[in-house]
C-alpha cells in the first residue's frame, strides 16, 4: 500500500491528506435539517448528516489528493450509527481510488492489539470464512507500551501489504510533557523514531517502509532531526493550517526527491467555508470551499518545496 500512496502523490502532484474529522458544528444547517427530517434528531439523523457532508467533500476533492484520514472518534461519538458511517466513508473513499489512513491511535498489547489490527487492517475468521472489518489501508498507533503493542500490527500489515503511522512527535502543545523528556541525553521522541526505523526494516516496500511516523508540522526543527533518523519512513504531518503549521515549516519533512511526507489538514479543509477567507462560497457551497482550500494548500506546499 505504500507504493499506491507514493503513486497517488506523484500522479496528483499533491502530498496532501484530508482529515475527515466531522462534527455537527461543521455540517451546514441545510444538511442537518434534511437528515433530521428523515431520521429525527437522533443518532441516526446525526450520522446521516455526517455521511452526506463527507460524501460531498470527497466528491469535490478526490481528484486533487492522494489520501484521506478519517478520525474514528468523530464517528464513535454517534455510537453504532456513527461507526456505520465511518465504514461507509472508508469504503466510498477507496472506491474513489484514495488511500485511507484510519486515525485510530490504538495502543494495547497481546491479543487486544492483535484484535485491533485484525479489525482495522486484516481479516477476522468466522467459522470457515474470513471477513475484513473496517479495512483501512493504514492505521495510526500509539507505541507507548512498546514492541508488544506494535508487532501484532506489523504482523497483520505484512500479511495484507498495509501500513502504519506510529506516533513519534505529535503536533499538540503539551506533547513535550512526555515526548521531549530526556532519556540520558536523548529526547524520548528520538528514541521512538529510532524504533520506527528498526520496525520498518521488517516491512519494507521498494524504497520506503510500510511503517511510517506521525510528526507534527508545529515542530519543524524536530522534524528535521527525525527525517534523518527515519530515512526510509514516510512521515504523516498533522498540524497544518488550523494548528498553525504552514508550507515553509514542512521543507525538512520531505526527502531530497520531494517524497517521504504527507501533510494533513482537517478542519482547515472540511470547514473551510466557515473561514473568512472562503466565506464568499457560503454554507450551501461548502464542498467548493473545501476544494479551493486544497488547491491553496497544494500551492503553498509546492512553493515551499521549490
Image: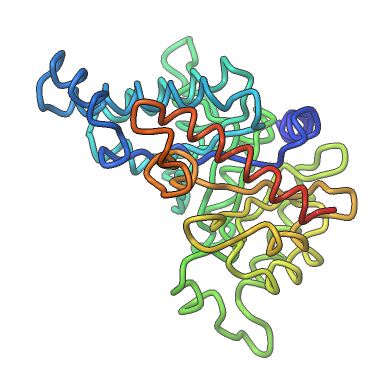
Residue 30, percent from left and from top: 24, 24
Marks counted in the figure total 0
Question: In the rendered view, does 17 fall on the left or right side of 110?
Answer: right
Residue at the image position 75 percent from the left and 71 percent from the top: 225
Q: How is the image coloured?
A: rainbow
Quadrant assignment, res 285? top left
Which of 43/129 is in front? 43
Q: Is residue 233 left or right of residue 131?
A: right
* Closer to us: 282 or 8: 282
Q: Is 139 located above or below residue 31 in the figure? A: below
212 to the left or right of 125: right
Is residue 155 depicted above or below 133 in this figure? below
Pick the quarter of the image with the N terminus.
top right
Q: State the residue lying farthest toward the top.
A: 128
Q: Position of residue 206 (x, y in %)?
A: 87, 37
> Measuring 84% from the left and 54% from the top, which residue is drawn there?
255
Using the image as rendered, state which of residue 57 and residue 263 is in the foreground. Answer: 57
Q: x%, y% of residue 197? A: 75, 58
Q: What residue is drawn where x is 63% and y is 49%?
A: 263
| Residue 247, x across and y down, in percent | 68, 57
Q: From the viewer's side, name the closer residue of 253 and 102.
A: 253
* Lateral position of residue 159 relative to residue 22, left or right: right
What residue is at 48 percent from the left and 34 percent from the top? 289
Q: Find the residue positioned furthest to the front.
A: 280
Amino acid at each position: 500500500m505504500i507504493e499506491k500512496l507514493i503513486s497517488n502523490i506523484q500522479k496528483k502532484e499533491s502530498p496532501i491528506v484530508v482529515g475527515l474529522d466531522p462534527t455537527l458544528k461543521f455540517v451546514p444547517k441545510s444538511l442537518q435539517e434534511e437528515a433530521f427530517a428523515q431520521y429525527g434528531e437522533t443518532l441516526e439523523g446525526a450520522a446521516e448528516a455526517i455521511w452526506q457532508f463527507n460524501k460531498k467533500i470527497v466528491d469535490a476533492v478526490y481528484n486533487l489528493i492522494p489520501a484521506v484520514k478519517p478520525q474514528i472518534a468523530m464517528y464513535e461519538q454517534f455510537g453504532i450509527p456513527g461507526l456505520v458511517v465511518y465504514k461507509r466513508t472508508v469504503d466510498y473513499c477507496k472506491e474513489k481510488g484514495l488511500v485511507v489512513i484510519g486515525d485510530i491511535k490504538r495502543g494495547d498489547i497481546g491479543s487486544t492489539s492483535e484484535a485491533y489490527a485484525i479489525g482495522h487492517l486484516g481479516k477476522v475468521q468466522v467459522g470457515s470464512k474470513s471477513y475484513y472489518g473496517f479495512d483501512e489501508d493504514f492505521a495510526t498507533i500509539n507505541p507507548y507500551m512498546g514492541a508488544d503493542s506494535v508487532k501484532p500490527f506489523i504482523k497483520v500489515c505484512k500479511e495484507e501489504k498495509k501500513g502504519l503511522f506510529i506516533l513519534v512527535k505529535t503536533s499538540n502543545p503539551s506533547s513535550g510533557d512526555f515526548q521531549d523528556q530526556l532519556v540520558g541525553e536523548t529526547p524520548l521522541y528520538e528514541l521512538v523514531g529510532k524504533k520506527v526505523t528498526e520496525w520498518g526494516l521488517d516491512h519494507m516496500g521498494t524504497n520506503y517502509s510500510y511503517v511510517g511516523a506521525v510528526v507534527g508540522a508545529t515542530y519543524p526543527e524536530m522534524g528535521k532531526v527525525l527525517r534523518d533518523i527515519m530515512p526510509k519512513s514516510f512521515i504523516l504531518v498533522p498540524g497544518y493550517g488550523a494548528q498553525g503549521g504552514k508550507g515553509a515549516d514542512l521543507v525538512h519533512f520531505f526527502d531530497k526527491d520531494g517524497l517521504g511526507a504527507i501533510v494533513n489538514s482537517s478542519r482547515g479543509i472540511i470547514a473551510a467555508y466557515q473561514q473568512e477567507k472562503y466565506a464568499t462560497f457560503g454554507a450551501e457551497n461548502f464542498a467548493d470551499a473545501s476544494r479551493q482550500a486544497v488547491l491553496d494548500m497544494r500551492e503553498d506546499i509546492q512553493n515551499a518545496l521549490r
